[in-house]
């Protein structure tokens, strides 16, 4: 089985000032010690790097790249997934729903992944199981 890792999960783990840090860090350790495959997309990595660099600086980017990225299976988004996600984003017509979210949903469905490590309510709205619970 696999768990999709979202930007909000990464941020909550890396940012000790994040309101959800404690719970997210505990869940992250549980995930790392499980037998689950940790999946994310290159879109999530780009979004995470931009936010981490802005909020926490280059030292945190280095930590992310050296300690977290190596344990991930990265799904590289192709044209078809990008277009399907963009179609979903435009159809949803919601200001706070992002293209990266829609790419994540499309990727999860294509891979048959039902669980996400995320603090983003949009995943639950889409019917996915969210950790931390």
Image (tube, rainbow, N blue to C red):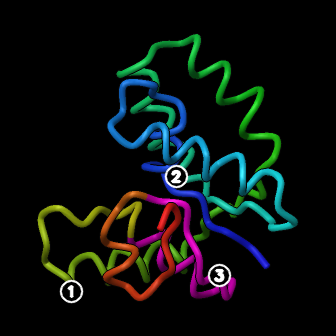
Looking at the rendered image, the quarter that the N terminus falls into is bottom right
In terms of sequence position, does the residue under pointer 3 or pointer 2 come before the other? 2
* Residue 49 percent across, percent down from the top left: 51, 33
The quarter holding residue 31 reads bottom right
* Residue 43 percent across, percent down from the top left: 52, 54
Residue 5 shown left or right of residue 85 in the figure: right
Considering only vertical position in the picture, is 110 above or below 50? below
Report which residue position mark 2 lands on. 44
The quarter holding residue 73 reads bottom right
Considering depth in this image, is 59 or 16 the residue closer to the camera? 16
* Residue 44 percent across, percent down from the top left: 52, 52
Specify whether residue 108 is painted magenta.
yes
Considering only vertical position in the picture, is 24 above or below 115? above
Secondary structure category for the residue under label 1:
helix
In terms of sequence position, does the residue under pointer 1 or pointer 2 come before the other? 2
Report which residue position mark 3 lands on. 113
State which region is magenta.
Answer: 102-118
Q: Which mark is residue 91?
A: 1
């Amino acid at each position: 089985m696999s768990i999709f890792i979202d930007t909000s999960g990464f941020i909550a783990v890396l940012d000790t000032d994040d309101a959800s840090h404690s719970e997210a860090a505990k869940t992250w350790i549980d995930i790392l010690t499980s037998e689950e495959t940790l999946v994310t997309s290159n879109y999530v990595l780009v979004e995470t790097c931009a936010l981490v660099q802005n909020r926490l600086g280059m030292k945190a980017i280095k930590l992310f790249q050296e300690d977290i990225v190596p344990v991930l299976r990265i799904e590289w988004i192709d044209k078809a997934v990008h277009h399907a996600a963009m179609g979903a984003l435009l159809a949803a017509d919601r200001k706070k729903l992002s293209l990266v979210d829609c790419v994540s949903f499309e990727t999860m469905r294509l891979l048959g992944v039902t669980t996400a490590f995320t603090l983003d309510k949009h995943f639950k709205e889409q019917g996915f199981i969210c950790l931390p619970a």
